[in-house]
Image: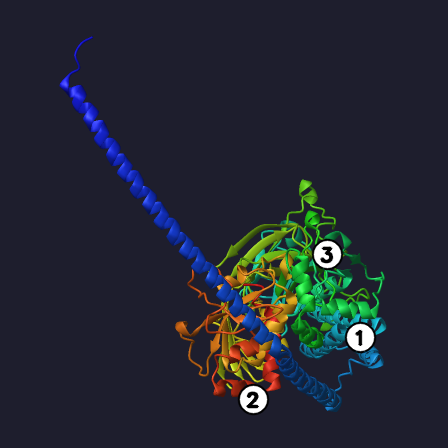
């Protein structure tokens, strides 16, 4: 056996040193772990103590809140009922005053509420031989005012017999107005040969007033090379094929600023219930397969629902959460004392909104949508800018001048429609079998706003509905605001836009401007708007000028403003169908409505704003920014505080809008309250609280109506 080397011995000694070092390191590691365990235990103990402290603090605050809950609820109930009583009295008095003023007008217009007066008016006007276009258009404007009044009665009618009565009156008046337009058109076309344009050899004319624009072209020369005509002064144009260019025809583009056809579609095709609803009382969501859909034709009948059931369903029309709540959440909301306060006021507010047209109830029936045949859904789309009636007629026989005598052939049939492409053409060739499409072009009306490229729909007279098929070669010149297209035949058409194109809101803010004054600012998906509120009047403001000049800067009540904005294409209002087309935060409607009530009560002294945490806090809660604000300047960023609202209580949050994660922990220096207004009062000055108590009931009602009509806590 060879002797061991010195290096081997030295290696063995190093191993022992390493062992010693390893033992030392192991001991140090053990000591560190023991220290870390001790520190962890201390931290856990501190956290446990902190949790216990917070739990005790929460229990103390809950006990304190419980002790004053009834007083706070009673005070809120008193404020709401006081305002509701005053508003109801004012509206009743205003209605009686309006009725008396209507009676004392003595302008020859019938009382729309009296069926005999309406029938007499329609009968006398139908028999009136007047065909002068100026006189007839003046008569039509008076009839249009009557249509608006009857439409209001139709929407408000609860008795089925009255509802049917007003519906018939509406249809008769609308048909008579259109009939009068035909009579004036016929009278002008009978004299077409005496008004020939020297350059074209045909007759063309434009007649317009505040409500209608009539463009007429009579084919006198029958030039086979004629392609079409642009009425430059109004921005309308048409294109016709050779078959029509050599025929005895007249083309008319009648643009009415109003839309009676969509109203007819709504009355003809009924949607009784929505596809997704949740009861305001917290009931379960109605499944889609249980939705009742009823469609009726002009001579059909609609099965009437029991009146009490209809009223209850209208009250429950605000849609609920997108998903089902847990049983615990529903039970909590049912047992909430705040819900009792809401129950006592929610019906009156919803009924008021319904009466003003802020929500679509069952009295306004809506057309069904059939994607397969391109029938327009008049909930998803809104016609804008009125209706363009695009017609071709047989040119009436023209007068002949013989030895100083005017000889004219009279036809009892009246103005006859030329049925293109079904008319027989005899050109002695295969061209007779080809019927090319006809073209149309229009400059977008200057009293509406199209937030997106407009879509064209044509009127199906047989089915009484709008359709988007049968329209080809659509082109839109955004710079000129001009749209051109072709159709297979002459039909009325309309320009449409998605109803909820400006939803959901990107942000919103409600800020006081003084006593009984505030501004509601909305940053929509496509356009930003602001509404100034003063007492019971609203004033719209927008940086966009085109299409809104007739309503921007004009004071009007909230229902008139809503109607004007929707008709102008800047809709920020919602109804029970909106959540079928727009993504929402899915909030409890009772909690949401209670928030709007209380925001309105304090709108003279407090500012409220959108919070990104509202979509993170769950369906049972709301989160918004709020603070006292007693001047008209913008709210400083560091003034805002976050508040969490629920069915049981309201609380101030510890997090801020800039926090990384959501937490429902309450602010250390705050308390719990059963109502939002008492939560706000904790951080308000005596002057601010006093200002809220002096708020006029009409201002409070207007703010609440605006919030309920837009529902910013749901659709942002």
Residue 635, image quadrant: bottom left
Q: Earlier in the sequence, mark 2 or mark 3?
A: 3
Q: In the rendered image, which residue does mark 2 sit on?
A: 694
24 relative position to 624: left or right? left
Seen in the picture, residue 28 relative to 231 is either above or below; the reply is: above
Residue furthest left as drawn: 6
Q: Secondary structure at mark 3?
A: loop
Q: Secondary structure at mark 1?
A: helix
Quarter of the image with the N terminus in it: top left
Q: Are marks 3 and 1 in contact (CB under 8 Å)?
A: no
Q: In the rendered image, which residue does mark 1 sit on?
A: 126
Mark 1 or 2, closer to the camera: 2
523 relative position to 245: left or right? left
Quarter of the image with the C terminus in it: bottom right
For the point 68% across and 53% down, which residue is it? 489
Q: CA distance from mark 3 to mark 1?
A: 34 Å
Q: Horizontal and vertical percent for residue 46?
A: 43, 60
Residue furthest bottom as drawn: 104
Q: Residues within 10 Å of mark 1 (few under 14, many from 20)?
A: some
Seen in the picture, residue 40 relative to 614 is either above or below; the reply is: above
Mark 2 or 3, closer to the camera: 2
Q: Residues within 10 Å of mark 3 (few under 14, many from 20)?
A: many
Q: Secondary structure at mark 2?
A: loop
Q: Horizontal and vertical percent for residue 347?
A: 71, 74
Q: Earlier in the sequence, mark 1 or mark 2?
A: 1
Q: Residues within 10 Å of mark 2 (few under 14, many from 20)?
A: few
Q: Which mark is residue 368?
A: 3
Q: Which mark is residue 145?
A: none
Q: Is residue 250 visible?
A: no
Q: Horizontal and vertical percent for residue 529?
A: 50, 70
Q: Is residue 311 visible?
A: yes
């Amino acid at each position: 056996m060879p002797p061991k080397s010195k290096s081997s011995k030295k290696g063995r000694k190093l191993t022992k040193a390493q062992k010693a070092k390893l033992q030392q390191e192991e001991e140090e590691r053990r000591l560190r772990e023991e220290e870390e365990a001790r520190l962890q235990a201390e931290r856990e103990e501190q956290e446990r103590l902190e949790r216990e402290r917070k739990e005790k603090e929460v229990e103390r605050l809950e006990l304190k809140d419980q002790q004053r809950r009834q007083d706070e609820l009673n005070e809120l109930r008193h404020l709401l009922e006081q305002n509701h009583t005053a508003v109801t009295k004012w509206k009743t008095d205003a209605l009686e005053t309006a009725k008396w003023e209507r009676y004392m007008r003595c302008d020859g217009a019938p009382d729309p509420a009296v069926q005999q007066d309406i029938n007499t008016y329609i009968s006398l006007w139908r028999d009136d031989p007047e065909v002068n276009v100026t006189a007839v258009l003046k008569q039509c404007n008076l009839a249009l005012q009557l249509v608006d009044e009857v439409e209001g009665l139709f929407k408000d009618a609860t008795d089925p017999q009255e509802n049917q009565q007003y519906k018939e009156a509406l249809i008769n008046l609308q048909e008579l107005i259109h009939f009068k337009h035909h009579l004036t058109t016929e009278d002008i076309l009978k004299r077409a040969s005496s008004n020939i344009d020297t350059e074209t050899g045909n007759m063309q004319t434009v007649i317009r007033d505040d409500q209608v624009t009539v463009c007429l072209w009579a084919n006198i020369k029958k030039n086979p090379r004629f392609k079409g005509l642009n009425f430059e002064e109004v921005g309308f144009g048409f294109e016709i094929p050779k078959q029509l260019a050599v025929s005895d025809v007249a083309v008319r583009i009648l643009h009415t600023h109003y839309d009676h056809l969509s109203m007819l579609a709504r009355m003809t095709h009924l949607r009784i219930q929505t596809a997704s609803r949740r009861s305001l009382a917290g009931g379960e969501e109605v499944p889609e397969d249980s939705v009742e859909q009823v469609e009726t034709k002009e001579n059909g009948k609609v099965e009437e629902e029991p009146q009490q059931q209809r009223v209850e369903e209208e009250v429950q029309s605000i849609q609920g959460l997108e998903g089902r709540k847990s049983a615990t959440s529903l039970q909590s909301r049912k047992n909430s004392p705040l819900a009792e306060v809401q129950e006592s006021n929610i019906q009156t507010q919803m009924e008021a909104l319904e009466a003003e047209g802020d929500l679509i109830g069952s009295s306004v029936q809506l057309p069904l949508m059939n994607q397969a045949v391109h029938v327009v859904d008049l909930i998803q789309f809104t016609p804008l800018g009125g209706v363009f009636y695009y017609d071709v007629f047989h040119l009436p026989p023209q007068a002949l001048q013989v030895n100083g005598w005017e000889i004219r052939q009279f036809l009892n049939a009246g103005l006859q429609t030329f049925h293109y492409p079904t008319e027989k053409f005899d050109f002695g060739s295969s061209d007779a079998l080809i019927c090319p499409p006809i073209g149309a072009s229009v400059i977008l009306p200057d009293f509406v706003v199209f937030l997106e490229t407009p879509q064209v729909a044509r009127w199906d007279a047989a089915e009484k509905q709008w359709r988007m098929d049968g329209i080809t070669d659509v082109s839109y010149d955004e710079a000129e605001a001009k749209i051109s297209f072709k159709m297979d035949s002459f039909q009325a058409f309309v320009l449409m836009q998605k109803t909820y194109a400006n939803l959901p809101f990107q942000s919103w803010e409600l800020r006081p401007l003084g006593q009984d004054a505030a501004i509601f600012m909305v940053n929509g998906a496509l356009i930003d708007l602001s509404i100034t509120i003063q007492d019971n009047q609203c004033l719209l403001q927008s940086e966009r000028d085109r299409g809104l000049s007739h309503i921007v800067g004009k004071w009007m009540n909230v229902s008139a403003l809503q109607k004007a904005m929707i008709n102008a294409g800047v809709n920020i209002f919602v109804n029970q169908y909106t959540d079928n087309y727009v993504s929402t935060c899915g909030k409890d409607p009772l909690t949401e409505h209670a928030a709007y009530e209380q925001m309105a009560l304090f709108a003279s002294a407090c500012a409220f704003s959108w919070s990104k945490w509202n979509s993170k806090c769950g369906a049972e809660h709301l989160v918004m920014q709020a603070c006292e604000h007693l001047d008209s300047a913008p709210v400083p960023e560091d003034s805002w505080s976050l508040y969490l609202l629920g069915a049981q209580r309201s609380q101030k949050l510890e997090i801020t809008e800039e926090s990384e994660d959501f937490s429902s922990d309450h602010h250390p220096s705050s308390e719990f309250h059963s109502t939002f207004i008492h939560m706000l009062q904790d951080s308000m000055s005596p002057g601010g609280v006093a200002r809220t108590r002096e708020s006029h009931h009409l201002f409070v009602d207007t703010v609440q109506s605006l919030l309920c009509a837009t529902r910013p806590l749901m659709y942002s």
